[in-house]
Amino acid sequence: MSSKEVQEKQLGKLYESLNSDKTAIIPEDKAKKLITSSGVTPEKMADYLTTMASDLMPRKIRDEGRESTDVEVYAIPANYFGITDNMVNFNLNEGFFAPDNHAKGEEVKILGKEIKVFNGYSTSDMGTFLCLYLFQHGRKTVDELVKELGSYDKTFLNLLVNRLQDDDFIRVHTEEDGTETLEIFTKKEREDLSERRLKALGQKDN
């Protein structure tokens, strides 16, 4: 059973709990009531399950024109913005990421291609995670990022995306249909940009 099938089965169980007949079957069995916290209604729970099911649908992956399928080619920040549990719900141990430094050289299939496992970065660094997410899933609009990473705070994601842009780890890319997406820099592109800036500053000072 694939992970998607497992998730669909789990969602089905949640639907059953929401809609099940909670009458007592035997005398000593108490009739069960729907348990809800303050402000949460059965309708809200049903809407949430619909959203979760929708999120399981295949997502658009934009990897056309990608320079390389080797993640080592790209400028992925390390020790950029480490977070703690009380800041945001966070887990980097997903997808192709392997925090085991001894696993270098292992390959996995991502986007239909064999790609090196990425190792050696902190599993609590949100800057690393966002750039790796764009590498793994292709270019995304900021709205797509916010939707797909729904367990993370929306405002925090917006702040971090702008910081990554300021530090030349990601940039805005305009798709053929005019959609503005975010893509990651290669190491060479980032180095070239830095050199051009320094040269331009030198010319300005002169």
Image: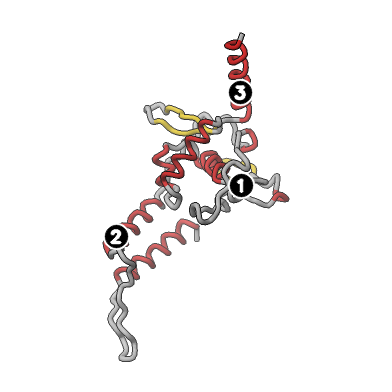
Q: If you read the primary sequence from the N terminus, does the residue marked by circle 1 or circle 2 appear first? A: 2
**The disc label shown at residue 44, or none:** 2
* Three-letter residue code for mark 1: Val
Q: Nearer the viewer, residue 159 or 195?
A: 159
Structural crowding at the residue carrying mark 2, measured as other residues with C-alpha within 10 Å and reported as few (<14), some (14–19) or many (≥20):
few
Quarter assignment of residue 128: top right
Q: Is residue 111 visible?
A: no
Can residue 138 be seen?
A: yes
Q: Is residue 91 left or right of residue 58?
A: right
Estimate the spatial distance between the alpha carbons at disc 3 and disc 2, rounded to whole Å. 49 Å
- Disc 1 residue crowd, few under 14, some 14–19, many 20+, Cα 10 Å: some
Q: Which amino acid type is marked by label 2? A: Lys
Q: Residue furthest right?
A: 102
In this orientation, which residue lies closer to the viewer: 178 or 9? 178
Instruction: For marks 1 and 2, give the CA distance.
Output: 38 Å
Mark with earlier residue (3, 2) = 2
Name of the residue lying farthest toward the bottom: 27
Give the number of callouts.
3
Q: Which mark is residue 108?
A: 1
Q: Amino acid at mark 3?
A: Ser
Which one is in front in this view, the residue at disc 3 or the one at disc 2?
Answer: 3
Mark in front: 1 vs 3: 3
Residue 205: image quadrant is: top right
Q: For mark 3, what is the residue?
A: 194
Q: Image check: 121 left or right of 9?
A: right
Q: Tell me: 75 left or right of 19.
A: right
